[in-house]
Amino acid sequence: MRRAITLGALVIILGSCGQTTVATGAPEASPSEMPTEVLSLRKEAERAFAAGSLNKADSLYSSALGITPKIPSLLVSAAAVKTRLGKLEESRKMLREALSLDLDNAAAWKLLGMNALEQKRDEEAFACLAQATLHDESNPRAHNYLGMAAGRKGWGEASEQELRRAVELDPNYADANFNLAVLYLGRTPPLIELARRHYQRALDLGAQRDPAIETLIAKAVASQPSDSPKSSLP
């Protein structure tokens, strides 16, 4: 369900995300309208990023932005590299610039929220990720991270709703299944079968085993009344 946001609520959300510049609303230049040199630098940066050469990608994006500094998608891509390099404040600055140019940029909102989660800015993270899902309702990653942000704030129902939405959008999303397992284990009492099911699904999708979670599941199963159905991990 899409969220209706009033003007007043939008101002609050923008303030929480540190976004105070009014978007210009100007359309982004299409690839055919970008300088050939910028297109070349961007493609080379994308290849470097895919190959794990983050410092090279960072340098290439900086060169591209030195030529055309007002392209939102370029700013978001450059910010993603900064994030991977652990330069979260530099990434945040770029994302705020991207949003000043395009307030509807879901990718910028999502990465800004992910950075805020990493920095434990929980209020900002929730506000930004809510914007990400508003502008891209079908993005499972945005819903997953919004679920994590809601969980940080102690909003269990909202967290479950967003994580389940992520799994509905992408049944093969290991992280969302893993996060659901953690959420169900944290309930009072724990929802063991749901936790076990989502944890196993996460493992099947390539997630690494977590001894702490497996111990919790095993203890919870062992503490169940003898006449209750028990389950165990394979």
Image (cartoon, grey):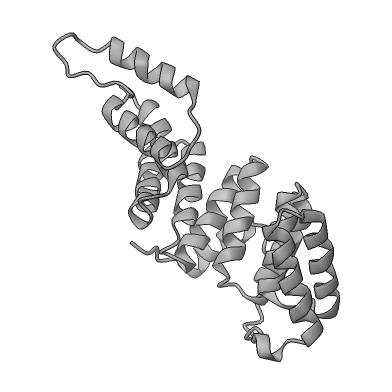
Q: Residue furthest bottom?
A: 33
Residue depicted at x 42% and y 31%: 182
**Residue furthest out toward the left:** 227
Question: Would you say 200 lies left or right of 121 here?
Answer: left
Q: Does 122 appear above or below 69?
A: above
Say left or right for 33 vs 129: right
Q: Residue at x 48, y 28 (%)?
A: 209
In the picture, the quarter occupied by the N terminus is bottom left
Q: Position of residue 34 (x, y in %)?
A: 73, 87
> Can you say which quadrant of the picture contains the C terminus?
top left
Where residue 228 sits, quadrant-wise, is top left
Front residue of this view, candidates 146 and 16: 146
Look at the image and tell me whether residue 20 can be seen: no
Look at the image and tell me whether residue 217 can be seen. Answer: yes
Q: Position of residue 226 (x, y in %)?
A: 18, 8
x, y (%) of residue 24?
A: 66, 81
* 214 relative to 195, above or below: above
Which residue occupies 35% across, 41% down?
157
